[in-house]
Image (tube, helix red, strand yellow):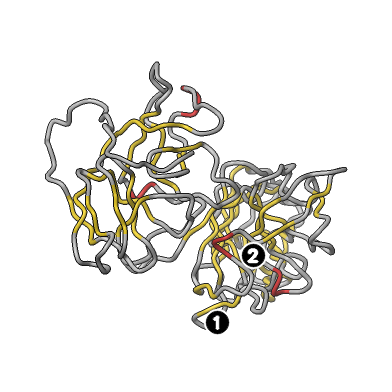
């Protein structure tokens, strides 16, 4: 698609009960934005026209043309509005089944359902089905809901957040021949998906990758633009997974490296899930959770009996313990383990208990 070369009549869906005054954002240097165009802020906090640049964060729709082509950053302000606006669509046309899905910027007047492997910034969510001219209504400016493939606005003290489709929990020996159906939490990935590698033998290789063209079940992996090789990232950066998968769906993984910053492909970012839950049945009064990484000895394990099934009372409760000793082994998947026991007294296991427990491991402590 081609960016705007003149002002655009960008229709708004409905008439708000309360008409908000235009907000303003200081313009970036040497830019010209047109009325009706999508605008966002760059890493320095200055407004510019949206494009397929994952470092941009959406702010709204330009109310009028602003010409700062001969100016410096901050010389003028761009008035913008938020709400539901109609935009051109690139790629697969959205349908009513896509309502609520995130739409991504292709340019300053075009959106897409595809984030192009993390190389397009989110602009809002699809509010309704497209109208007759195929333009799609997008709720623009609701930053709290825009936690997509590109970086979130971290200026308010939050962590930069990104998105992946799945997490890989075993080592990928050859990054040029990634098996798209292996150890990805039950998912088979396709070209363009983002996968988080969390258990690389070479620890600095951990982090997000884009899946390339698939051939014979294998695909090359490359770093996305927002996590480029050699770039410096902040500790605390988060990778959010969607609603697919078996163990890790809807989880958020955070880089927990001890220092303030991470150099991609040099530093192990130490991605751990903030919280993971599951349900497991005891076998002779015990079970082991070995598929979830445990960040530290301060990580918390919560246990709740969901289905009782015991011929003898578990008077001592349920604990991460082994014969009275601490049952938590910290580390990444392959090293970490949480051994749970039903007890009748301190250090005494109730082998008759085969109840089903709901468990949560919280690594935020």
Residue at (82% x, 50% y) in the render: 179
Residue at (68% x, 47% y) in the render: 355
Pointer 2 local density, CA inside 10 Å: few below 14, some 14–19, many at least 20: many
Q: Which mark is residue 258?
A: 1
Tell me, yes or no, if residue 348 can be seen here: no
Q: Is residue 19 left or right of residue 187?
A: left
* Secondary structure beneath label 2: strand
Residue denoted by label 2? 207
* Furthest residue in direction front, as rendered: 70
Residue depth check, mark 1 versus mark 2: number of the one nearer the observer: 2
The reply to whether dot 1 and dot 2 touch (C-beta < 8 Å) is no
Q: Nearer the viewer, residue 241 or 57?
A: 57
Q: Which mark is residue 66?
A: none
Tally the marks: 2
Residue 359 at x, y percent in the picture? 60, 54
* Secondary structure beneath label 1: loop
Q: Nearer the viewer, residue 334 or 290?
A: 334
Residue 180 at x, y percent in the picture? 78, 47
Q: Nearer the viewer, residue 241 or 307?
A: 241
């Amino acid at each position: 698609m081609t960016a705007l070369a003149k002002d655009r009549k960008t229709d708004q869906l409905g008439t708000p009960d309360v008409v908000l005054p235009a907000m303003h954002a200081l313009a970036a240097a040497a830019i010209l934005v047109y009325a009706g165009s999508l605008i966002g802020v760059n890493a320095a906090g200055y407004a510019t026209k949206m494009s397929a640049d994952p470092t941009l964060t959406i702010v709204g729709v330009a109310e009028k043309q602003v010409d700062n082509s001969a100016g410096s950053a901050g010389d003028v302000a761009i008035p913008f509005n938020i709400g539901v606006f109609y935009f051109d669509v690139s790629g697969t046309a959205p349908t009513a089944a896509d309502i609520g899905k995130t739409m991504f910027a292709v340019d300053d007047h075009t959106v897409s359902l595809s984030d192009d492997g993390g190389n397009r910034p989110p602009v809002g969510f699809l509010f309704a089905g497209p109208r007759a001219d195929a333009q799609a209504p997008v709720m623009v400016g609701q930053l709290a809901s825009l936690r997509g493939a590109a970086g979130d606005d971290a200026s308010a003290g939050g962590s930069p957040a990104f998105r992946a489709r799945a997490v890989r929990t075993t080592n990928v020996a050859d990054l040029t021949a990634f098996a798209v159906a292996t150890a990805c939490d039950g998912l088979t990935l396709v070209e363009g998906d983002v996968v988080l590698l969390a258990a690389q033998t070479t620890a600095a290789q951990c982090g997000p990758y884009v899946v390339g063209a698939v051939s014979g079940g294998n695909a090359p992996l490359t770093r996305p633009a927002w996590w480029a090789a050699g770039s410096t990232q902040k500790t605390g950066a988060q990778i959010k997974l969607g609603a697919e998968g078996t163990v890790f769906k809807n989880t958020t993984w955070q880089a927990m490296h001890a220092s303030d910053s991470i150099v991609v492909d040099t530093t192990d970012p130490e991605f751990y899930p903030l919280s993971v839950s599951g349900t497991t049945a005891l076998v002779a009064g015990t079970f082991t959770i070995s598929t979830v990484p445990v960040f530290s000895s301060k990580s918390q394990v919560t246990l709740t009996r969901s289905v009782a099934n015991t011929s003898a009372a578990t008077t001592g409760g349920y604990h991460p313990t082994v014969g009275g000793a601490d049952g938590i082994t910290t580390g990444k998947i392959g090293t970490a383990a949480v051994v749970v026991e039903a007890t009748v007294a301190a250090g005494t296991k109730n082998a008759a208990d085969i109840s089903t427990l709901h468990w949560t491991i919280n690594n935020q402590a």
